[in-house]
Image: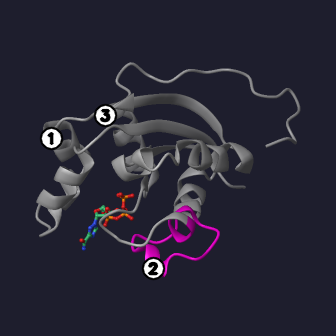
Amino acid sequence: MPARERSFIMIKPDGVQRNLIGKIVGRFEERGFKIIAMKMVHATTEHLEKHYADLKNKPFFPGLIKYMASGPVLAFVIEGLDAVKTGRAMLGATNPLASLPGTIRGDYCLVTGRNICHGSDAVESAEKEIALWFPEGVIEYKDCEAEWVY
Ligand code: RTP
C-alpha cells in the first residue's frame, strides 16, 4: 500500500515569471493531491543555501543560488499517496531534455539551469524542506468524506 506522504514543491523564479503557476499547481490538484500549505517567497541567499546545502560543493552551486534568488518562488506542500515519488515523476528528470512529454519539465522547459520546478527527492528531505519553508506549520482540513476518492 503506497504511503500517505507530504512533499515540498516549489515553482522556481522562471516558472513564476513565465506565468506557469496555475498550470503547475493545477497538475498536482488534478492528480489528486491535497495542498496543505502555500506561499510566495522572494528567498534570501542564506535561506536558499540552507535549502540546497547538499549541493554546496557542486560547481553549479553559485549559479543555482543566484537563479533561485532572482525572483519570487511559489512554495507549497502536497499531501497524498506516495507524494514524494509521484511528485518527482510528475516533474520529470533534472535535465528537461531528458524529461518525457507529459511531465512538467518535459512540457515547459529546455535547460537544466532553468528547470522551473522543484520537488523533494525523499521523505526525509521533504520533512526538512517543509520545516525550512513553513516553520509556522501546515494546515489540516477534510477534503472528502469518501475514502475511495483520492
Ligand atoms: P531540484 O532539487 O531543484 O528539484 O532538482 P533535482 O533534484 O532534479 O536536481 P539536483 O541535482 O538536486 O539539482 C538541483 C538544481 O540545480 C540545478 N542544476 N544545475 N549541471 C548543472 O548546471 C546543474 N545541475 C543541477 C537545477 O536547477 C537542479 O534542479
User: Residue 36 falls in which quadrant of the image?
Assistant: top right
Disc 2 and disc 1: Cα gap in Å? Answer: 28 Å
Q: Is 97 contained in the magenta span?
A: yes
Nearer-the-camera pick, 31 or 139? 31
Q: Between disc 3 and disc 1, whose residue precedes?
A: 1
User: Residue 78 falls in which quadrant of the image?
Assistant: top right
User: Label 2: how many residues lie within 10 Å, few (<14), some (14-19) or many (20+)?
Assistant: some
Q: Position of residue 139 (x, y in %)?
A: 55, 21
Give the residue pinned by disc 3: 132
Q: Position of residue 122 (x, y in %)?
A: 44, 55
| Residue type highlighted by circle 3 | Leu
Give the residue pinned by disc 2: 97
| Residue type highlighted by circle 2 | Leu
SS at circle 2: helix
User: Label 1: how many residues lie within 10 Å, few (<14), some (14-19) or many (20+)?
Assistant: some
Q: Which residues are magenta?
A: 92-107
Left or right of 104 on screen, residue 68: left
- If the image is split into quadrants, where does the C terminus sit? top right
Left or right of 79 on screen, residue 19: left
Q: Position of residue 77 (x, y in %)?
A: 51, 37
Give the residue pinned by disc 1: 45
Contact check, label 2 and label 3, Cβ < 8 Å: no
